[in-house]
Image (spheres, helix red, strand yellow):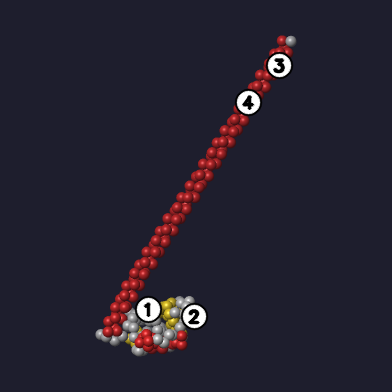
Amino acid sequence: KAVYCHPAYLTYIGLNLPQYVSNELLEEAFSVFGQVERAVVIVDDRGRPSGKDTVEFSGKCSEGSFLLTTFPRPVTMEPMDQLDDEEGLPEKLVIKNQQFHEEREQPPRFAQPGSFEYEYARRWKALIEMEKQQQDQVDRDIKEAREKTEMEMEAARHEHQVMLMRQDWMRRQEELRRMEELHNQVQKRKQLELRQEEELRRHEEEMRRQQ
């Protein structure tokens, strides 16, 4: 289903927009579904059409293959939270070349079953749906890959922290061992000095007695 909307004043984003579509044509085209509050062709930084649009309107859309120009690729509308605050592409800024006039030969309309337009609109819809499904699968795969990478990164970070703590503990143990060894050496030196002093004292006393 290429066009699907819901009642109430809501904003929708349109995809697969033909090149030669302006804000005015967009508003005129979607007025068949009800009152259009605002219709904007989304453009890039250079003012070129991006193939997307936003439409704010009320009423319920019919379902089918809705074509905006001669090109038999249906526009797809999907709900969005709010309308972007941009001017879009006014009719006066659209380049009026030969391709423009060829595209504008036919007004916005639903493709009639059994027609050439209907057949290719159906094929476009199938291609668009396949692209959407594949993109959804890619998005899921990317999400899973991100989650897996985050889990692995968290585990590696934890392991790294444990390794740093272990290394720090080993350094402290080594420092403690060196301090104990130094303390023992000092104690031995003191004991040796005390024995030497004691021996010297005894020797001096012995010498005095012999005199």
Q: Dot 4 lies on which element?
A: helix
Which residue is tagged 1?
Answer: 16
Q: Earlier in the sequence, mark 4 or mark 2?
A: 2
Q: Which mark is residue 86?
A: 2
Quarter location, residue 22:
bottom left
Q: Earlier in the sequence, mark 1 or mark 2?
A: 1
Q: Which mark is residue 191?
A: 4
Residue drawn at (41%, 87%), measured in percent from left and top? Answer: 96
For badge 4, the amino acid type reads: Gln
* As drawn, 192 above or below 120: above
Q: Dot 1 lies on which element?
A: loop
Residue farthest top in this picture? 210
Q: Are marks 1 and 2 in contact (CB under 8 Å)?
A: no
Q: Earlier in the sequence, mark 3 or mark 1?
A: 1
For badge 2, the amino acid type reads: Glu
User: Distance of mark 3 from mark 1, alpha carbons?
Assistant: 113 Å
Relative image position of residue 30 (x, y in whole percent): 40, 86
User: Distance of mark 1 from mark 2, alpha carbons?
Assistant: 19 Å
- Which is more foreground, mark 3 or mark 1? 1
